[in-house]
Amino acid sequence: MGQRIDVNHLNVYYGDFLAVEDVNMKIEPNKVTAFIGPSGCGKSTVLRTLDRMHEIIPGAHVTGEVLLEGKNLYGPGVDPVAVRRDVGMVFQRPNPFPTMSIRENVLAGMKLNNRSVDKKDADELVEWALRGANLWDEVKDRLDNPGIGLSGGQQQRLCIARAVAVHPQVLLMDEPCSALDPISTLAVEDLINELKKDYTIVIVTHNMQQAARVSDYTAFFNLKEIGQPGHLVEMNETKVIFENPHEEDTERYISGRFG
Amino acid sequence: MTAAATNPEFHRGPQPDFDKFKPSRSSIQTRKYKDIAMRVLIYIAFLIALVPLVSVLWTCLAEGYKRLDGYFLSHNMVGVIGGMYPYGGILHAIIGTVEITFGAMVISIPIGLMCAVYLVEYAQKGPLSKTISLLVDVMSGIPSIVAGLFAFSLFTILLGPGTVNGFVGSVALSLLMIPTVVKTSEEMLKIVPSDLRECSYALGVTKQRTITKIVLRTALPGIVSGVILAIARVIGETAPLLIASGFIANTNFNLFSGRMTTLPVYVYNEYSQGLATCTPAALKLNPPCLPGIRMERAWAAALVLILIVLLLNIIGRIVAKVFSVEGTQK
């Protein structure tokens, strides 16, 4: 089951630079929430704070809180590594591990965490994850082939399988389709619709049609001005955002009359 | 004319005359000639570069094969006098070279690799990492004789004066090896895409396991090639080993005690003694006294050294192949 996320008064800093200011939002469980907005407005940054991935960049830190099912991810004693096991992530570019086969890629989360799994359990997990990612039928006969031998769309679905194989509660996707052709995009979008039964999904996208197609809720981020921090302009049901936004900025962005 | 091609509404600034930038017909023709001329030059340069390479290999083979046999490979120089029978061999030098080089590998690969991991994965472009990089650069320029003297003096301080054994040689060689290992490993770690690190972290994998299982694993073929290059660089070192490990006629298996001969030192030593003096009576003995035996032994030992480096290269290539990253050109 997916879990709900509450973001309260979140400020994200890169060193001294305030990148995103005062974000408050509720991300509903088992729904797809899309983050839209112009480049550089901080939507990917906010997404990364939901599994503490921003901390990889030296100097990046946040104030405020992110509650996963009521538990603060930034509370004292919370291990970022443990957070990332509960909150999975799929990246913009498909990036299967080049040294691993399809099967090993799916098992990477387990194997790299040094959990020993016996072969039968591993086989079950591989099939479950690949079926979950809608890839099983395409690769079941060549599980031992290298993961990077697949097409771009297949690779991205392999990455999704790899992410769901650690069995997270939440799945974050950072522009998962921007490097894919329309047919692969469609496959991934169908998959997102399936996955939301089991996971809470947050997706960053530049493609507004995509946001309209796949998401239940949409959050619009924007910069107040060049050089100013990004902020959350409006968040609502996707239908409301696209048909009847409350903010003028949102409407201008949605209708393409931006800037 | 050209001004009309650009819309004055958008280009309010200067209006460049694009006709002036077009390549003229003659320049296209000259380019073709230049291309041919440069091709010829490059091929000639390539051939010239190849000449000494082939010549060295050929000379080593032609001169070295005379003395290279089972006896030569399985005997040392104990009881060898001048050009008289027994003719002696290089078993002790092969053992010395292999053990000392192995010792140098054991010291320098972990240090060099960890240093590279620190520089790429941990250091944040601060003064410490810059200092380390600078020191590594300086270290790679140390003349090998200095490394030999340094190792000798170090062990004189640690274990008393006159400490000369295989391990002192290993330390001297590792001083020469570490910079190469650091440099090549650093380059190899840098080209591992940061995507892979990120997505490993995103799977909830710790930094330690990300580095060992993803970063080092992906960079492994390149690191192996780099290490082989570093070994090939030090295996032929003569000067530091002459100081640090000395020269001896018998076979010494103990890296930590007693002098050890290595192949390059052996070659030098044989060469430096010149022709053997044979009395007319000795020339008629069976087997006879051979005046030119020392040069023959030197060439044969040199050939063996080349073969060892070649073998290392082949092993390295196989390792790199086995652990190669599928789909990339490596």
Image (spheres, coloured by chain):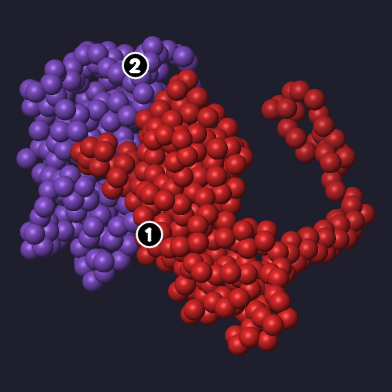
Whether discs 2 and 1 lie on one chain: the answer is no
At x 45%, y 74%, the residue is B74
Quarter of image, res B48: bottom right
Q: Answer above or below: position of A99 versus B163.
A: below
| Left or right: where B148 falls relative to A105 | right
Q: Which mark is residue B253?
A: 1
Tell me the quarter of the picture where residue B66 sits.
bottom right
**Residue placed under numbered mark 2 in the picture:** A13
Q: Secondary structure at mark 2?
A: strand
Q: Can you name the residue that lies furthest to the right here?
A: B26
Please provide percent x and percent y for residue A174: 32, 37
Q: In screen coordinates, is A22 left or right of B285?
A: left
Chain A, hue in figure: purple
Q: Are marks 2 and 1 in contact (CB under 8 Å)?
A: no
- The answer to which image quadrant residue B2 occupies is top right
Type of amino acid at the residue the image marks with label 2: Tyr
Chain B visual colour: red
Residue at (21% x, 54% y) in the render? A106
